[in-house]
Amino acid sequence: MSKKFAFVCFGIFFPSYLFASEILFKNGDAYIAEEVSEEPGYILLSWKEKRYKVPRSELQRVDPRKKGPDSSYRYSEFKLTDGTQLKGILIEKKENKLILKTELGFVELDRYKILSHNFEDIPSESPIIPEKYLLETSKQIEWRIGFFGSGYYSWGPWGRTFPITYGGGVFLERDTNSKFWFYGVSSEASIGKGKNGSLSIWSQSAYLGRYYGNSSPYWLLGAGFSNLIRTGDEKVSAANPDLIFEFGWNWQTESRSSIRVGIRSQCSIEEGSNFCRSGLRFSWGFAI
């Protein structure tokens, strides 16, 4: 009982970040990480609830004297127009200035005094440990549920009858065991107005896709069916198979949400004239 009590008290009064270390890569990116263990050719570390294995050849140093919660920053060196060399941690990038934390304190640099760097190329975001160092056991297979909105332009004869359709829906998707691959199902309702009536579409689809990093292009291929209801002089209803292709840009947030903006093309195979449309789609999925 006393041992359990001591363990609980230890966890309360001595947070895990007291045993953290600074991991400095050779490119200047630095991370305060926990559970750092050193092996002859690499180090293992835990950062933002994920485990990484980094070759020693990629690192400049491991400093156990620097503590804190999981965080990241960038060491930078600048040569100024007067010949001065400044080294420090880049704290903030403003419109025309940089703020550095040096050994002597905080320094504000005017962009026009920086000789060694193109100001526009200096990154302002905090670094993230590259995915290539992620351990297989840390690659989480996640479910996401979300919503989307879309607007389409119709092609061919349908473009003259119902040129614009728009709508929205929900989706459920999951990461696969293979890195960056995902699959899912979606349901969408959309409508369009024409000269001689209106069009209502209810689409169900399954898809497989891939992205390439936390902020990267993505694509997906899918198939399903749509129920088309046309109203005008008379009401006509039909269920047709669909083919889908979509590509665009994917953002993975720290909260594990997935935000996508893409161009989507969808064709309903119909006798006489296929109903094909293309347009923009915005989707936001939340990890569950």
Image (cartoon, rainbow, N blue to C red):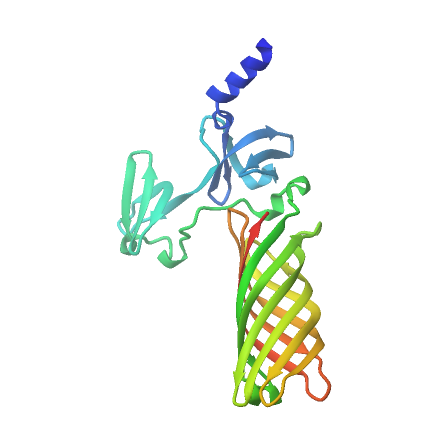
Q: Quadrant of residue 129?
A: top right
Spot occupied by residue 126 in the image (x, y as percentages of width and height): 44, 46
Q: How many marks?
A: 0
Residue 281 seen in the figure: no
Which residue occupies the foreground of this view, 239 or 20?
Answer: 239
Residue depicted at 56% across the width and 38% down the height: 49
Spot occupied by residue 199 in the image (x, y as percentages of width and height): 58, 80
Location of residue 245 with respect to 19 vertically, above or below? below
Residue 279 appears left or right of 173? left
In the rendered view of the protein, which quadrant contains the N terminus?
A: top right
Residue depicted at 52% across the width and 34% down the height: 33
Spot occupied by residue 73 in the image (x, y as percentages of width and height): 43, 42
Residue depicted at 58% across the width and 87% down the height: 232
Residue 144 seen in the figure: yes
Which residue occupies the foreground of this view, 26 or 200?
Answer: 200
Q: Quadrant of residue 74?
A: top left
Residue depicted at 51% across the width and 25% down the height: 19
